[in-house]
Image (cartoon, rainbow, N blue to C red):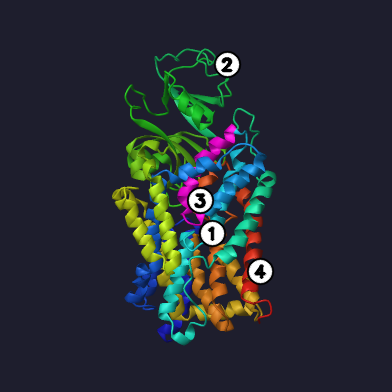
Amino acid sequence: MDPVQWHPWLVGAVLVTAVILMVRGRAPDIALLCGLVVVMLCGVIDAGTAIRGFGNEGLLTVAALFVVAAGMQNTGTIRWIASLLLRSGGGIRTTLANLCVPTAFISAFLNNTPIVAVLTPATIDFAKQQRYSPSKLLMPLCFATTLGGTLTLIGTSTNLVVAGLVESAINSALPNELNGLHAIGFFEITRIGLPLAIIGITYLIFAAPKFLPQRVPVIEPLSDPRQYTARLEVAVGGPLDGRTIIEAKLRRLDGLFLVEIQRAGDSISAPGPDQRLRGNDTLVFAGAVEQIVALRSTPGLNPDGEKKTATNSRGRLMIEAVVSNSFPGLGRSIREFGFRARYDAAVIAVARNGERVTGRIGDIVLQVGDTLLLEANESFLARNRSSRDFFLVSGLPSSDLRPQRAILALSILVAMIGAATYSGNMLAPALAAAVAMVVCGCLRAADARASIDISILLVIGSGLGLSNAVEASGLGASLGQFILGLGAGSVLASLAAVYLVTVILTSLISNAAAAAIVFPLALATATQAHTDPMPFVFAVLFAASAAFATPIGYQTNLMIYGPGGYRFGDFVRFGLPLNIIAFVTTITLLAWQYGLWTTT
């Protein structure tokens, strides 16, 4: 058989394998890049076509916008905005409105990752002051940034991925094959995104107080959902050696309790106040981060497995970090992975889904969404602020910020938006804004380089190359005909099918990867139906951002997963209705705007 006849099967197998690898936790950039190499080596596309995506305007624009967002964060602009959003008074729904509406607007022009990173600790502190459970606020905050990202072309990197795919398709198509396909304007998606954001945020404001869980009553001592386990060792001959628990003042601690004492292989659960401590006893505490940090300063208590000296805490900071899905130590214990040597940071405590993690700290096997309390030196933040291994959600020192340039950074952002709107091109204004952020001192050149997420760029470039392979092999045309057949020839039903396939994929793998995989199928479906391809393009764009039903659908979901004390089911229960709302709203608006109600 002619090898070309095997190309659709080969490309299909490559895509299925890549999706399986990503679902199983493999890095999307590596999975897609390996897939691209396979189709190139097998002759489906030549090397020039394979690497063309890495020079795409959308990819370069995403890189530039990472720097712009870093400049906004580094000047403290986002933190200043956070202080304006979080105001007391008016009840929980008023608080949600004050938080969600402006946050969505900001997310229309900035990457939502730094927004969530800055607002998460501020929201938790505000919730404790107002006696709200943080779980009532953090998920609405996260989803509001996602909805806001659909308001403009630069709202999310996924939008720019789709814009880059459109540009690539236009450049490779013959004039008579374009059939209405055109570059996406800066505010073109607003006509769909704005009604969607209004309806979605209304749902967040009214549904969150009722349907989001409050894991424990906020008036209880352990009301903070960020429940940690910490293990401290009684120093031999220290001031606590030989004292009872009550004499050591370890009874009735504020927001903290002694779970058990481990002694010479035995375990004393729920020890009483008269239980006497001995040197080398391991005390297991559970509670909130602030109390554990304070407890570590108690004379005679050492971190488990580490002898405390007079100098080992000098210049050290306490930092909270959330383990990401690209953390290299997933599935391995802290000790086996060598966390301390790799990051020069000690794991003091671990929280998972708002519950205590049992066992010795070194034996804990880290999972996506775990929240870590780390003790590290001051250089840790500078080295790992842009790390993809985990998301830093607190501990950023205000001394590193440059608030005197906040107005300048905001002016650069506004100028970039104005230039992009006027010119109809996003790349040049984004590059100019990125350069201006560095030249004007809003951030250092080293910070600018560190802010660029190489993994996202690899996903985009590889996804564009695989999209070319899907088209060149004929797989796209075949699947497009299949999708049209599923819709019984109805363009509207086929549009809904494209949306649903995208939203299912984006709930399992990264948004950019889902968009890159489905886009050629959507374009092929429109071609087979002899209809305008733009509603199919927008269906992919909006569905790829509708990652509400799982914590792994988007990185901001993971960022609030641990700190909010959420469980997987919370995202399904609260996010799935929002997915349905987004689906009905998007398809209805697209059908109305493009006259698809009667199209067959």
Q: 249 or 139, which lies in front?
A: 139
Q: Is residue 446 magenta?
A: no
Instruction: Where is residue 493? Give x, y as percent.
Output: 65, 74
Q: Which residue is tagged 3?
A: 556
Q: Earlier in the sequence, mark 1 or mark 2?
A: 2
Q: Which residues are magenta?
A: 107-129
Vertical relation: 193 (above or below) 205:
below
Examine the image and state in which quarter residue 345 appears.
top left
Q: Earlier in the sequence, mark 2 or mark 3?
A: 2
Q: Which residue is tagged 1?
A: 508
Label 4 SS = helix
- Residue 588 is tagged as 4
Residue 33 in view of the camera: no
Vertical relation: 269 (above or below) 133:
above
What amino acid type should be assigned to the residue bearing mark 3? Thr
Q: Which residue is tagged 2?
A: 273
**Left or right position of 28 against 150:** left
Q: Earlier in the sequence, mark 4 or mark 3?
A: 3
The C terminus is located in which quarter?
A: bottom right
Marks 2 and 4: CB-CB under 8 Å?
A: no
Q: 473 or 9, which lies in front?
A: 473
Q: Earlier in the sequence, mark 3 or mark 1?
A: 1
Q: Residue at x 62, y 49 (%)?
A: 569
What amino acid type should be assigned to the residue bearing mark 2? Pro
Examine the image and state in which quarter residue 246 appears.
top right
Q: Nearer the viewer, mark 1 or mark 4?
A: 4
